[in-house]
Image: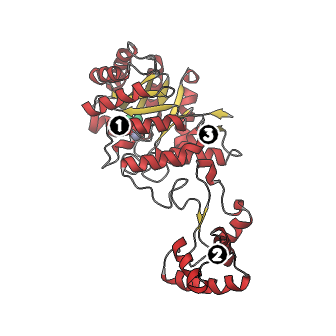
Amino acid sequence: MRKVDIFDTTLRDGEQSPGVNLSQEEKVEIALQLERLGVDVIEAGFAAASRGDFNSVKRVAQTVKRPKVVSLSRTVKKDIDAAWEALKDAENPRLHIFIATSPIHRQYKLRMSKEQVLDNAREALAYAKQFFSEIEFSAEDAGRTELDFLVEVADMAIKSGAIVLNLPDTVGYLSPEEYAHIFKYVSEKVPDIDKITLSAHCHDDLGMAVANSLAAIEAGVGQIEGTINGIGERAGNAAIEEVALALNTRKDYYSAMTGLNLKEIARTSRLVSKLTGMFVPGNKAVVGANAFAHESGIHQDGMLKNSTTYEIMRPETIGLSQSNLVLGKHSGRHAFRDKLRNMGYQLNDEQVNKLFERFKDLADRKKTINDEDLIALVEERWGEP
Ligand code: KIV
Ligand code: ZN
């Protein structure tokens, strides 16, 4: 099976989440955990953005060993200089240079013609080549760029020495089919496209960042960009853990896999949530607190008979110890008996039946029943077991 590289931008696009501001120490801690997770590339920041960002990129570059370390840069000399200064000590430095290509960005933001965009990028790439042997070029807002102009941009980037070409859906606008079409079109029309790696970078404005990333993989990209827990600008970026688990769970369907150490996913998610202060919703795919929790009696009964009835992935795969059968008003007798047994109570059928009625009354009043509630229920009736 083909391997796709994972480019993690938690420390750059992820940190662009409103309200998030990571210290240098926090960035290094996350970078080391990303290295344990096995990501291929870490975008450590935007060195020219501030002194703090510069120092963080430098510290990450000096600390991690195996992953490539990247700084973002506009197509301007001072950004390239700052990126090189911050990255020159890295084992594997990469420059990530971008310019917007869509008509909306050309007209309102850059006030540049197509030719000016091409010339500007060509010149910046030539300058960057003096320092960096590895350059990724991004056509910002590629998703809303004319296809034929994207072909020209891609051709210019390859001829100017980029070895990775990223075509981002910057504003999370596209459907999976449309995004896949862009990669197929560019792959067909651009000579030498097979000499470089194509990369996908998706935002989640319409909730399709992961689906679009998976579609891009099927269209042949060799690198996926995303963040842990899907944090990032506005509605966020593609959640790396979701992309990785989709590929791992549906090996029968997808044609690629990641090289991630999936057992580190839960830990990485918790660390990013703690340090960024960005809470992970309970129902979030893969890493939400409820992703492996079951409340209904029918589901719990199925789970106790065979976990594949209601789980398509095992919690152990992402480094969790077990699924969670939550006791509440929808729970059944089977899960209730099982829970009491695991807590050390040896009760006969009659005792379990009596307690089960009292448990249901309590569950009508209380959203979830925890171990203390169950202890109180048993001991108030029979004393110490
Ligand atoms: O979303 C985007 O287009 C970006 C680029 C800088 C790659 O984050
Ligand atoms: Zn982005």
**Residue 370 visible, this angle:** no
Q: Residue 336 has which mark? A: 2
Mark 1 or mark 3, which has the lower sequence index? 1
Picture quarter with the C terminus? bottom right
Counting other residues with Cα less than 10 Å from the Cα at mark 1, is it few (<14), some (14-19), or many (20 or more)?
Answer: few
Q: What residue is disc 1 on?
A: 25
Q: CA distance from mark 1 to mark 2?
A: 45 Å
**Along the polypeptide, which appears first: circle 2 or circle 3?**
3
Please give left or right for residue 353 compared with residue 320 in the image. right
Disc 1 Cβ-to-ligand 1 distance below 8 Å: no
Q: Is residue 110 visible?
A: yes
Dot 2 lies on which element? helix
Compare residues 292 and 324 and report the one nearer the observer. Answer: 324
Q: Amino acid at mark 2?
A: Phe
Identify the residue under disc 3: 218
Viewer-proximal residue, 253 or 3?
3
What residue type is disc 1 on? Glu
Mark 2: give few (<14), some (14-19) or many (20+) Cα within 10 Å.
many
Counting from the top left corner in percent of width and height, residue 185 is at: 55, 33
Q: Please, what secondary structure does the residue beneath circle 3 have?
A: helix
Within-10-Å neighbours for mark 3: few <14, some 14–19, many 20+: some
Could you tell me which residue is drawn at 63 percent across and 51 percent down? 316
**Residue 372, x across and y down, in percent:** 52, 73
User: Quadrant of the rendered structure where residue 46 is?
Assistant: top left
